[in-house]
Image (spheres, rainbow, N blue to C red):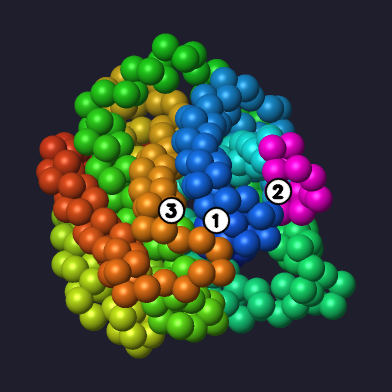
Amino acid sequence: MEKQKGTLKFGEIFGYGFGGMFMYGFQLCVTGYFLMYFMTDIAGFSTALAATLNTIIQGLKMATMVFSGAIIDAINFKSGKYRTWVLVAGIGLGIFFPLSFVYFDLPVTVYSVIFIVIYTIHTIFYNVGWTAMRALMSKMGRNNADIISLNVAAQVGGTASSVVYGYVGPAILGITLWAGTKQAYAGASAIFGAMIIVGAILIYNMCKKYDSSAAEVTANAPKQERIGFIQMLKSLRGPMIPYFFSYSFGAAQQGFFSTLLVYYTTYVLNDANAAAVALSVTSLAALVGSFLVPAICKKFNKKAIYLAVQGICAVLYICLALFGRTAFGFIAIRALISFISTAGAILQSAICNDIGDYIEMKGEPAPRAFLQGLAGTTNRVGMLISSMIASFGLAAIGYVAGVAFDAAMISKLIALIAVGPAIVCAIALVIMLFYRVDEKEIAAYNSRKYAQTQQ
């Protein structure tokens, strides 16, 4: 496809991935795979209440993700438009993430309200940080090769932390200070929260030359202006429509897996420790797959790669329903799905960046953070759909904490974790067929834009 040489140094690419999604990745492991379990088996919420709260949480994640992009585009800091938000969000997340998992010995009605309030604040900081880091790519990257490299770094960082968590997570939860208590997840999250703050400081300092008042002068670029809400809304048309809906359905596959993994390994595979093994192996598969994406992008355009990913994953999920009742079969197929789907995840922000370039190319200001916020919102929409189906489905099949699954419940659980994802992948594929952006035209536009900043 397009053969360009990146302009970023290896240390900058590595620092972006390490300070960003590697540090955030541990938080994602805890919230993504143990949130429902924490509510039912530690906080003591009923399965129905936990399912309701989980649905509310996913809805709040979706709503606040859109808000994150709007506020970043509307408010500028002299110290840097995006890197400053990375720092602010990192500090906030580092504090409120562990607070979300503090156990309060209070009546369920009171505790559930406190839990939702703290978790909402935690979510806002996460979304602002995620969006700011993705928008920062438009400042750092000069061409498609740079953008792909930064996306790969983010994906590698996130998956690497998942691999590491599979080994260090149980040990951190088993630290004597909180092992065996209801505060174990809060204690472990406090360590991960401190790591997030360190990562935010790293990115803030590293990106000064790309995102600050001084950087604008050095690059001979126009000063970044505030973008009004009306201009943000104008971006909700054209290629953004199929992109948004396709990625929303594509993201839905993950919600089934993350919500049901602990239950599946415990009651279907009869091995509670298999959850950590599955997480590590699938993350390692994604890590390996990530390194292949730049080479694939040189041969095929982004849309073609994304369509292939969704089609292959749909088939693999059907295989999971047929052959996933053993630990080996389940983990092997899930690892293959993870290996394939990582390309789609990496291209998410890259395709969204193309949409921003497309808007600029048409002579309009591109609300970069708002667009990336919408990209992140697709994850939230997908998670809302799938986690709602999965969590309420868990309640519908009769799950009660501590009660073993019978054969009928096992079959229904397999259907939830395999057939549901196959359907949403197929829908995502069909919708993306309507996405129309000429990547060669975008590449030519970026070359001209970069050349002008060097004059």
State the extent of the magenta-drawn residues as a range.
99-111
From the image, which quarter does the N terminus lie in? Answer: bottom left
Q: Residue at x 72, y 73 (%)?
A: 173
Q: Which amino acid does the dot numbered 3 rest on? A: Ala
| Contact, mark 2 vs mark 1 (Cβ under 8 Å) | no
Residue 431: where, in percent of width, then height?
17, 41
Q: Residue at x 70, y 43 (%)?
A: 108
Q: Residue at x 64, y 24 (%)?
A: 76
- Return the disc, 3 or 1, that comes first in the chain's sequence: 1
390 is higher (above) or lower (below) than 239:
below
Would residue 75 be visible to someone looking at this image?
A: yes
From the image, which quarter does the C terminus lie in? Answer: top left
* Badge 1 density bin: few <14, some 14–19, many ≥20, Cα 10 Å: many
- Return the disc, 2 or 3, that comes first in the chain's sequence: 2
State the separation of the CA atoms marked 3 and 1: 12 Å
Q: Which mark is residue 100?
A: 2
Instruction: State the image quarter where residue 301 is shown.
Output: bottom left
Q: Which amino acid does the dot numbered 1 rest on? A: Met
List the residue tagged with mark 1.
36
Element carrying mark 2: helix
Element carrying mark 1: helix
Q: Is 47 left or right of 342, judged from the image as shown?
A: right
- Return the disc, 2 or 1, that comes first in the chain's sequence: 1
Asked if the magenta segment contains residue 100, the reply would be yes
Element carrying mark 3: helix
List the residue tagged with mark 3.
395
